[in-house]
Amino acid sequence: MWGFIYAGAFLGAFILSAVIKMTYDPMAKKFAFEWNDSVGKIYADLSYGEGEANKFDLYVPADNTKEAYGLVVYLHAGGFTSGDKSGDAEMLKRLCSMGYVAAGINYTLFSEAHPDANVYTQSLEIKESIPFVIAEAEQLGYHLDSMAMSGGSAGHCLAMLYAYRDAAESPLPVKLVFGGVGPSCFYLEDWINMGVDPEHPAPVDPHADYSGIAALFSAMAGKMITADQLMTGAYLEAVKPISAAMWIDENSVPTVCAYGAWDRVQAFGASRRLEEALTKHQVPHEYIVFPHSGHGLQNDNALSALYMEKIEEYLDTYMPVR
């Protein structure tokens, strides 16, 4: 029960910050696009499993004459406890207007009704959904030959897990991953420092009570993790299945990511480990730090524009519309 209460309170903040970002878009005018029947069509609430949340929306271009299309999956934010694919309709429309088949996918949320849901089970649902998305697109006449994973916050975390951990088993070659403020790994020394001066991380105190963080990691990983395990490092194997950065190697896909230096919702230090892993393995990437922003990336408008520009640049480079 303590784990559920602690995780619920913590992830509630995750949701609030995500809502702020989703409802405030200073770049909307600059990146405006047209959407009507001549641009694309939406097929909503298609099923990929037996669970109530196992639904996806498919956005297909009006032009169905190309030999092949790239698929872009965008996963919703919400702290792993709330949110819906419909909240990303504008992003999905924008991607479809660029000539891609786009998909928003729901997953079972961690809640009192689904206390066994966690980041790992959610990542498995996303993995299981992809063949259904491909089959639906094919049935509608859109042959897919490549894909990109993306998302915001919790959705970014799940997108990275698929792109780095599961890409080798993907039915389509994964060409890139992009997103913002998703937790990429779970090292104790990063998570005790959330919201503290990013240039001066707080050290691990061997006498401190980290039971709250242990409860949070347990809820997210779906495994019991104790405060003692945090101190000995034994917890790292338990969190690896939900730690995207720990799966990066020389074969990992090109990446665009954005993080707020003053994030009080997910560990900014974890994003640095992500960037270090990408650099170490010489993976093409753009790691954009918003120096005046928190989890909502709300205080650095010029960097918001740069982030969107880099997404389009990487799509053009690694998965161009033909």
Image (cartoon, rainbow, N blue to C red):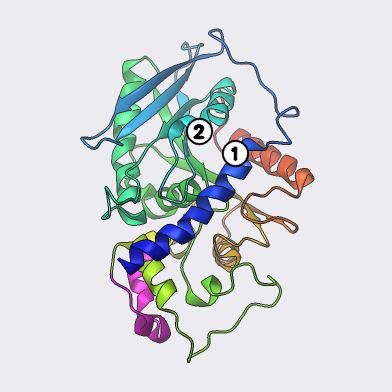
Q: What quarter of the picture does the C terminus occupy?
A: top right
Residue at figure coordinates x 47%, y 11% from the top left: 65
Percent position of residue 54, x then y: 29, 35
Residue at figure coordinates x 52%, y 25% from the top left: 100
- Side of 141 where 94 appears, left or right: right
Percent position of residue 266, x then y: 54, 61
Which label was assigned to residue 87? 2
Q: Residues within 10 Å of mark 2 (few under 14, many from 20)?
A: some
Identified by mark 1, the residue type is Met
Percent position of residue 194, x then y: 59, 68
Q: Most prominent secondary structure in the magenta stretch?
A: helix
| Residue situated furthest right in the rendering | 302
- Side of 127 where 61 appears, left or right: right
Residue at figure coordinates x 47%, y 28% from the top left: 102
Residue 244: tell me if it is visible. Answer: no
Residue 12 position (above or below residue 229):
above
Q: In the image, which residues are magenta? A: 224-241
Residue 226 painted magenta? yes
Percent position of residue 216, x then y: 40, 66
Instruction: State the residue in front, 310 or 207.
Output: 207
Q: Earlier in the sequence, mark 2 or mark 1?
A: 1
- Side of 6 where 99 appears, left or right: right
| Residue situated furthest left in the rendering | 50
Question: Mark 1 — residue?
Answer: 22
Which of the 4 image quarters holds residue 310? top right
Q: What quarter of the picture does the N terminus occupy?
A: bottom left
Image marks 2 and 1: residues in contact by CB distance under 8 Å? yes
